[in-house]
Image (cartoon, rainbow, N blue to C red):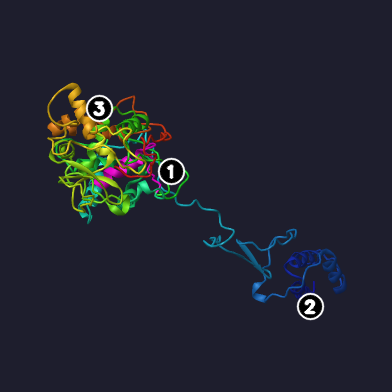
């Protein structure tokens, strides 16, 4: 092929693209075989063998002439790995997707530890001890005597079944917001799959009893109480009717037997919790200091006050209550020791002699007579009964002998209180399997629905007596 013809062919190759180069090479072979072609024929062959392409004019430096003749292949569209600029192909490294790219593969979200299995990872006494110490710190740092409030919270929570909830819209629960709020940080820190808020409240009640006496160890034996369902606030719990402060002995024994299955002795022992109680007029309407001389010590002084030390007279402060001494003026002593009708009921039976407002129409003892003998001085049989009627003295209650037992023995009282209080704090749960391990045992079941309150003859259940 003449030089000029080859030059023209190269120029045409530049115009139509790199795929025409193979055609030029074929034309050179044809020339060597002495096949004469005119410039026009060569141009026609290139046009006929080249498929139409978009006109691209690359620079001379980008031309790549292959030594071997190959069949042209369609040019694939650019990808992330290979991009084409004109006739120059560039191979690029794979592109790492941007973390915010919508095309990136989904990544798993961080997750916490799997839920704790209470059967394979049970609660240990060490874990309970840690929570106990946190509760003791709350008691030590409080600006009020918090231990009795924890004991009271335990009782109110477990009426109807221990479920970590109380209904603060009911007046009988007035004041319980103080211990509930005091325990909130402990609950937030230590509540988990195996220790509920109800468990922590029960433990706080045990600690409250433990730190106010030195004889008994109030250990946490059972865990697994279930928080009440369907509420987000523990102070919006289910409505449970509480017992009345204006109950006679029959109403009192009936309530504790129906609700907890307690007998007379267990009921009298549990009432001894009043030895660490205080009266708050804003909460209950009663006026006075409390039930005995030292409200910071759980002891038998409550029974001594009832039986021996003073003469009780009913007065009408905001409500009918009993005060000690030779008074009878009807004026309440804000700093004095008081008793409620439900306390006096342990030693005096005023069944049929109490009005709906709590007024008792019989007297605790003979005017001027000796120590609380339900009929006064000597004599026997019918003469004593006649004198009791003439002086309108309330007869002895069936539980007075139990009060005398506890009056005489603080050790006996604390032992019995320990047993009944522990039984109270598992109310609604099955403990029939027993617990013989050093670590707490776990029970199953849900709190039972609370029994209806027997209110004696007053008909008024909206009171606080515990």
Residue at the extreme top of the image, as rendered: 381
Mark 2 vs mark 3, CA separation in Å: 138 Å
Above/below status of 192 relative to 266:
below
Q: Label 3: which residue?
A: 398
Q: Label 2: which residue?
A: 4
Is there any visible trace of residue 204 in the rendered image?
Answer: no
| Residue in front for this viewpoint, 328 or 4 | 328
Q: What is the magenta range?
A: 148-167
Res 76 label: none
Mark 2 vs mark 1, CA separation in Å: 110 Å
Disc with the residue nearer the chain's start (3 vs 1): 1
Q: Secondary structure at mark 1?
A: loop
Residue 32, image x, y percentages: 79, 65
* Residue 113 sits in quarter: top left
Mark 3 vs mark 1, CA separation in Å: 32 Å
Is there any visible trace of residue 239 in the rendered image?
Answer: yes
Disc with the residue nearer the chain's start (2 vs 3): 2
* Residue 35 sits in quarter: bottom right
269 with respect to 457 (left or right): left
Q: Label 1: which residue?
A: 239
């Amino acid at each position: 092929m003449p030089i000029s013809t080859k030059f023209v062919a190269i120029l045409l190759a530049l115009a139509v693209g790199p795929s025409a180069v193979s055609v030029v090479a074929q034309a050179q072979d044809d020339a060597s075989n002495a096949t004469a072609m005119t410039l026009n024929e060569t141009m026609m062959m290139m046009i006929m063998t080249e498929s139409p392409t978009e006109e691209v004019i690359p620079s001379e430096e980008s031309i790549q002439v292959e030594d071997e003749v190959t069949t042209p292949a369609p040019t694939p569209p650019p990808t992330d790995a290979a991009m084409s600029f004109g006739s120059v192909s560039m191979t690029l490294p794979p592109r790492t997707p941007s973390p915010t790219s919508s095309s990136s593969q989904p990544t798993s979200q961080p997750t916490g530890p799997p839920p704790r299995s209470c059967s394979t990872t049970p609660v240990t006494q060490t874990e309970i001890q840690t929570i106990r110490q946190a509760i003791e710190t709350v008691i030590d740092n409080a600006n009020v005597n918090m231990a009795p409030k924890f004991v009271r919270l335990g009782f109110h929570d477990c009426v109807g079944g221990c479920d970590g909830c109380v209904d603060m819209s009911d007046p009988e629960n007035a004041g319980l917001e103080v211990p509930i709020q005091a325990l909130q940080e402990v609950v937030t820190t230590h509540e988990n799959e195996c220790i509920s808020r109800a468990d922590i409240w029960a433990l706080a009640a045990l600690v409250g009893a433990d730190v106010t006496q030195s004889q008994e160890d109030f250990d946490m034996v059972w865990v697994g109480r279930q928080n009440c369902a369907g509420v987000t606030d523990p102070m919006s719990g289910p409505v449970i009717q509480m017992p009345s402060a204006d109950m006679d002995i029959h109403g009192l024994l009936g309530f504790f037997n129906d609700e907890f299955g307690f007998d007379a002795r267990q009921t009298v022992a549990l009432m001894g919790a009043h030895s660490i109680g205080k009266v708050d007029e804003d909460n209950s309407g009663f006026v006075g200091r409390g039930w005995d001389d030292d409200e910071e010590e759980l002891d038998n002084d409550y029974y001594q006050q009832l039986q021996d030390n003073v003469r009780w007279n009913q007065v009408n402060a905001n409500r009918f209550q009993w005060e000690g001494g030779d008074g009878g003026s009807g004026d309440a002593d804000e700093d004095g020791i008081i008793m409620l009708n439900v306390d006096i009921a342990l030693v005096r039976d005023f069944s049929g002699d109490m009005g709906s407002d709590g007024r008792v129409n019989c007297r605790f003892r003979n005017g001027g007579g000796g120590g609380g003998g339900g009929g006064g001085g000597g004599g026997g049989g019918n003469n004593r009964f006649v004198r009791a009627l003439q002086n309108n003295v309330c007869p002895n209650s069936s539980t007075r002998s139990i009060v005398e037992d506890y009056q005489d023995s603080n050790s006996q009282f604390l032992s019995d209180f320990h047993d009944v209080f522990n039984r109270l704090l598992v109310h609604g749960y099955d403990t029939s399997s027993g617990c013989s391990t050093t670590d707490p045992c776990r029970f199953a079941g849900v709190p039972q629905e609370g029994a209806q309150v027997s209110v004696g003859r007053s008909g008024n259940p909206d009171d606080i007596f515990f």
